[in-house]
Amino acid sequence: MWLLDKLLNRLISEGRLTVTDHDGKSYDYGPGGDEETIRLRLTDKRAAGHIARYPQLGAGEAFMWGWLVVEEPHDIRDLILFFTRNAKKIGDDATHAQGKLRKFLQKAAAKFDGINLRGKARKNAEHTYNLTRRLYELFLDEDRQYTMAYYRDPANSLEQAQLDKKAHIAAKLDLKPGMKVLDIGCGWGGLALYLHKHYDIDVLGVALAPDQIAFCQERAEALGVADRVNFELCDYRDVQAEDGGRFDRICSVGLLEHVGTIHYPQFYEHTSRLLKPDGVMFSHCCGRAGPPGTTDAWTRKYIFPGGYIPALSELVSESEKHGWQVMDVEAMRFHYSHTLEEWYNRTVLHKDEIIALYDEQFYRMWLYYLAGAEQSFRHGTMVNWQILYVKDRTAIPMTRDWITEESARLRDADEAPVWSLDPALRQAAE
């Protein structure tokens, strides 16, 4: 316990935390104040050491395994937000591997994990996105948007915020009827179908998770648009190019986090060959509001193997080498924290069903993932980047007014559903 005690004494400078070790001995940290004390129990003698040596990985595993229990009325989200709010004062290093050797090994492992050759990329995608359909229905919005929602007002519903996100993206693409669009990492098809509906365009969506593509194809068939909106189980690197480019627009939402830094040159080179000379490429991805870093071991191991959240400098410098010109960058700061909070609340609401689908360890893993991701966008340095790339500067209008005007037009044309997939959520909304 002495290692964890040393860490917490250095870390906790506000609020109050009480830790009861497996032997019943309690330790208090922080000056206290108006907030209610957060109390946690360590149920296994190995827990304290496991957490102290690598807080991010160790705490996550301890919670998953039942070694760490947060006592009511608080939960793991309260603990993570409390812990990271305090850690922010002394830097992220407090939550990383402790000791020079462990830090070196973790960085080396993260770099190696970012090598995503075709077979590994497909395996990683299946690990992340090929979970049961019902799971995603339980915590996502009706359209299954598994990326940041756009909260024009934090009081908006998740459904409204996700619809506003699609309008914001569509406006930036500056689409015209008859265009051909490539949607790389198309998810469950929501954006592709939205773009076709509003602009009468042809869309090719590609992704690597078989159940995602099957679901997309079912949606397109049900809507009678499969001849115009096509979905393929395909690595973007295998999309065939043509002389002069095949596509007027390329978009990717939540894709660059899975590419791997070693593959950025290949991504920008291949997409350049796919896009027409007067085309536009749009990218929406999680990002670092600072220098390049590494993905923590817990996230790599349990949630996004092969994943890495890029710094803006990495994206811009690599794109420039392949003829791209960056024409517009928007840093979206706290939108994802609101999104993740809502996903967390919906997960808690469906605790029993999720445990029945998987087990309690999976449920606790999912809670830790959502709460940990939320803190990165609320108290850490994570943002979302939205970037427009062109080959020719005349490809987009002179001012950004077109984005504001078009997104407003789209919002006026749409009405958000109210949790219509799930009866419990629909009743709560009403």
Image (cartoon, grey):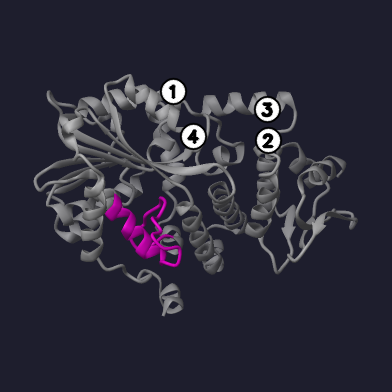
- Which amino acid, by three-letter code, is at mark 1? Ile
Classified by dominant secondary structure, the portion drawn in magenta counts as: loop
Task: Tell me the amino acid under the disc marked 3.
Answer: Lys
Tag 2 residue: 93
- Magenta highlight range: 140-168
At mark 2, the secondary structure is: helix
Mark 2 and mark 1: span between their CA atoms? 25 Å
Quadrant for the N terminus, please: top right
The quarter of the rendered structure image containing the C terminus is bottom left
**Label 2 crowding class (10 Å Cα cut-off): few <14, some 14-19, many 20+?**
few
Q: Residue 178 location in percent, x, y?
A: 9, 45
Which residue is pictured at 18% across the width and 27% down the height? 241
- Residue at 14% in and 58% down: 224
Q: Earlier in the sequence, mark 1 or mark 3?
A: 3
Q: Residues within 10 Å of mark 3 (few under 14, many from 20)?
A: some
**Viewer-nearest of discs 3 and 2:** 2
Q: Element at badge 4?
A: loop
Compare residues 19 and 92 and report the one nearer the observer.
92
Magenta-colored stretch includes residue 147:
yes
Kindly indicate the quadrant of the structure image that contains residue 313: top left
Q: Earlier in the sequence, mark 2 or mark 1?
A: 2
Tell me the residue that label 3 is attached to. 103
The numbered mark, 4 or 1, whose residue comes first in the sequence reads 1
